Amino acid sequence: MKKNAIPSVEELNFAIDGRGVFIWGARHEGYSTLQVFSRLGIPVEAFVDSSLALQGTQAFGLEIFLPSVFFSRFSFDKVFLIIASGFFADEISEQCEEHGFLEKRDFIVYNELKRFNYQVDISGICNLKCISCPRGNFDEHRPAGFMSADVYAQVLDKILREDPYTGIISLYNWGDPLLNKALPEIVKLSNEKSVHTAISTNLSFKIDFEKVIQAKPTWFRVSNSGWGKNYETTHTGANWELFLANLYKLRDYKQQHHPDMLVEVFFHIYQHNRDDYEKMQALCNELGFTLRYRHAALAPLDNIEKVIDGVPLDPASMLTRELQFLKVEDVIPLAQAQKDRPCFYETHLWINWDLHVAQCMEWYRPDLNLVESSFLDTPIDVLWDAREQSEFCKKCKSKGIHRVYCVYGDEKLIHEKQSIPIVAAVFD
């Protein structure tokens, strides 16, 4: 992690030099890049992404190319790339260089345009106790509560003042943002500042969320882990029929109020739910949603460290391990083999609803904060230095723990292991 000099708009335009701009990464960071470039008046032509789930789809009206197609059609003298991928930016950079693209001349990594990616957990509450999540497998929790719209406005102003290339803010982490009644106002405040918003929810509740969709969030993810009783097993405390009804409501609200909203159903692959994938794909096709997938992980990273250190796990975590298709004991060696690769989470700040800044978005221990002061009272340089000097981060990376969820999220591995019934394909 380096503290680079952030280029000015003039320097960025000089590097682009009239070439067409493509964004590699059609998820959070890609959306953020697109929004920032739109604010700057720099047109973007298309996305590049290796996810097969995104092929044949568009994001914000822009085509999404597979890497093989992109490299066969475009050369570095015609296009300039912005690499906006969290887990795999280093790998993508190497791939670009193999095709003659040079860093700084022909491509730049989006993270070098800003200090952090921002995750504002506006809800300190979740209605479920999923066995793979600390909400269901951890005894100690941070204080419960919600961030108000007024406080969020102050957080947003500070982020844009200190980190002006910010284009998207995720409004969730361990809590469900739809439980916060201020969410519609929070989304509107973000839109007024030309900042995209990302929402992730279990959508298994009786709360009506029409006003949220009317406020026009950018990206809306719904987590899923199967069909019927299989879903209720791992989304512990959820109700399948309620969840299904809410998916149809989401489709209707999207059509009525915000047709451009990107909706993604995120399927967590377990042993017991693999045959449910095709039913979920058919449902998403009917609803007009994108279905993405990953191997179900054991969260938080505190539990991964326990496995490495031989510390006993609680019953909920043990059940998660039993149900996993890609086992923790198989993931850890793969992650440790990557331990010299960058940490995706170092470039993130997780701001809790009560303004504490957590050490990491994937570790859960309630007392584990990056700094003692609140986000609003802490200059960005202090936050940066705290991350750079963190002994906790060094220990995590020395064990390869920082790469564990990169392995779980690797779609290439899903295809190699034939984890779910999907069409075989070659990744580039």
Image: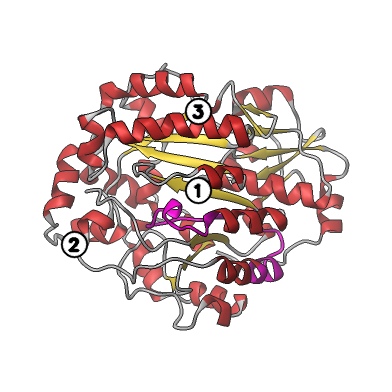
What percent of the width, then of the height, locates residue 4?
67, 66
Q: Residues within 10 Å of mark 3 (few under 14, many from 20)?
A: some
Q: Nearer the viewer, mark 2 or mark 1?
A: 1
Task: Please give the name of the residue rendered at 40% of the width and 68% of the height, measured from the top-left corner.
Answer: 393
Q: CA distance from mark 2 to mark 1?
A: 34 Å
Task: Please give the name of the residue rendered at 42% of the width and 39% of the height, measured from the top-left corner.
Answer: 222
User: Residue at label 2?
Assistant: 309
User: Residue at label 1?
Assistant: 199
The question of residue 268 being in magenta is answered with no
- The disc, 3 or 2, on the residue closer to the chain's N-terminal end is 3
User: Residue at label 3?
Assistant: 289
The question of residue 165 being in magenta is answered with yes
Residue type at numbered disc 1: Ile
Residue 226, placed above or below residue 208: above
- Callouts 3 and 2 close, C-beta under 8 Å: no
Residue type at numbered disc 2: Asp
Q: Quadrant of residue 18?
A: top right
Residues rendered magenta in the picture: 157-183
In the rendered image, is residue 104 in sight?
Answer: no
What percent of the width, then of the height, locates residue 52?
50, 25
Identify the secondary structure beneath mark 1: strand
